[in-house]
Image: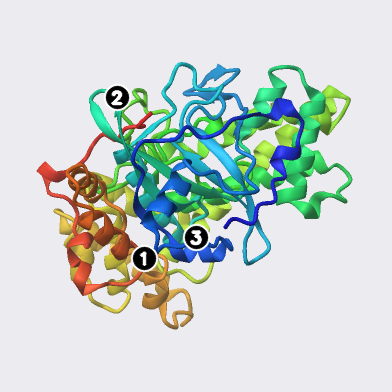
Amino acid sequence: MFHFDNSYARLPDRFYASVYPEPVDGPKLIKFNEALAKELGIELDPSDPDRLAATLAGNVVPQGAMPLAMAYAGHQFGNFVPQLGDGRAILLGEVIDDKGIRRDIQLKGAGPTPFSRRGDGRAALGPVLREYIVSEAMFSLGIPATRALAAVATGEQVFRETVEQGAVFVRVAASHVRVGTFQFFAARGDTDGIRALADYVIDRHYPDLKTDENRYAALLKAVAFRQAELIARWLGVGFVHGVMNTDNMTISGETIDFGPCAFLDEYHQMKVFSSIDHGGRYAYRNQPGIGQWNIARLAECLLPVIDEDQDKAVDVANAVLKEFGERFQAEWIKVFRAKIGLVTDADGDGELVQNLLSVMQQEEADFTLVFRGLADAAEGADERFLAQFADLSKAAEWLSSWRERLARENGADGGRAEKMRAVNPAIIPRNHRIQEAISAANYGDFSFFERLLAALEKPYEEQPEFADYMTPPTLDERVTRTFCGT
């Protein structure tokens, strides 16, 4: 049983299209997140997997649901598309979780909608498993992200480059409102729609802004700051989103859409994994700049409601964009100071971090293992850190400058190594391990999927039973391209 309270469905009709999921032939439960269901107050009986699968695949629409496909537009790789919308996702409704927070329940791959643009509205098994793995990994890493409630096999085939097994992903989000949602109304000159959407977002996500003198300007700043903080945290774990289009940037500040995403193995600042990112627009290093670019697109949408005087509105927006850059830099150095064990702030810390990253790039050192090994070095054991570099002299020289910096902290180092381990994961969802799980699942073996999920539940702990997940891929195991799955 879902205890629905569907606020988005109470918005004007032009915000969405009412549409029901299209039933599938043979739904079969792959994974159900019972802990998350409990948190959401969802009462579904896992002892009846057939009934559960039918509900989560969309064959049975729960009482109180108001299924709809949300309308939005977006810049895709810099090119504006005035109408996108949920082409293969259906918002069942909203629930209030055990913390009093409103959460969306969405079926991804539940059939065509009015926004499908000649697509089949379905999802393939591989992308569904990837999204389940990475979204739950992000949660365990402490990074704001959409969550995975369930994965269900449909018993049907979908046709992409090859014939693949179909599946439905049940996604949970603080909301699915995106920058592209605002762009949908801006492209139509619908200022009333922009204002109504902004008011809805403030009520739902930023209620403290209701009494602000200019709440729409305050909304722009609040969204910008959340995105700056989020992207800094992405960079801290080596995450490359892969498709940072404006329709993939949430107003709530959650990471959304894990299609061509990946985590760095060997470090390179211009690393690209997405098979459709031919120019490196969304490379690791470029993500902050793209975040700011996306916020600029949101600002353009909000100009008419920020101030009737266009020049004044533009000045407000430009000030926020400047603050985005400042906020990102502050968050980035905060993240990386913690990663290298610094407690105090000092001039030159940014240069110290950049010098390490430069050596890592020259040596193709593993991003995760370098920082994890540095925690050992904080206790005087340099071996694991140095083992990531072919040229030990460069790494040893950096260690020397790092220790000189630590010495200036005047003893503010209580529990430094443990604090470093609390922010530098031992286990991440490495690309080759995700692919291993997907490949096995395509042959009906979900044991690799289950084991990877189990390992990722405690990413900051070194778990001997999952030691193999801590090792980087060999050259022939490296996954250099990831795919959107649409």
Residue hosting label 2:
159
- The span from disc 1 to disc 2 (Cα, nearest Å) is 33 Å
Callout 2 environment at 10 Å: few (<14), some (14 to 19), or many (20+)? few
Residue hosting label 1:
457
Residue 326 place in picture, x, y as percent: 62, 46
The mark lying in front, picked from 1 and 2, is 2
The amino acid type of the residue labelled 3 equals: Leu
Image position of 236 with respect to 454: above or below:
above
* Residue beneath the point at 85% across and 42% down: 214
Tally of marks: 3
- The span from disc 3 to disc 2 (Cα, nearest Å) is 32 Å
The mark lying in front, picked from 3 and 1, is 3
The mark lying in front, picked from 3 and 2, is 3
Circle 2: element type: strand
Q: Which mark is residue 44?
A: 3
* Residue beneath the point at 36% across and 32% down: 484
Circle 1: element type: loop
Residue 16 place in picture, x, y as percent: 66, 29
Q: Quadrant of residue 57?
A: top left
Q: Which mark is residue 158?
A: none
**Front-most of residues 485 and 277:** 485
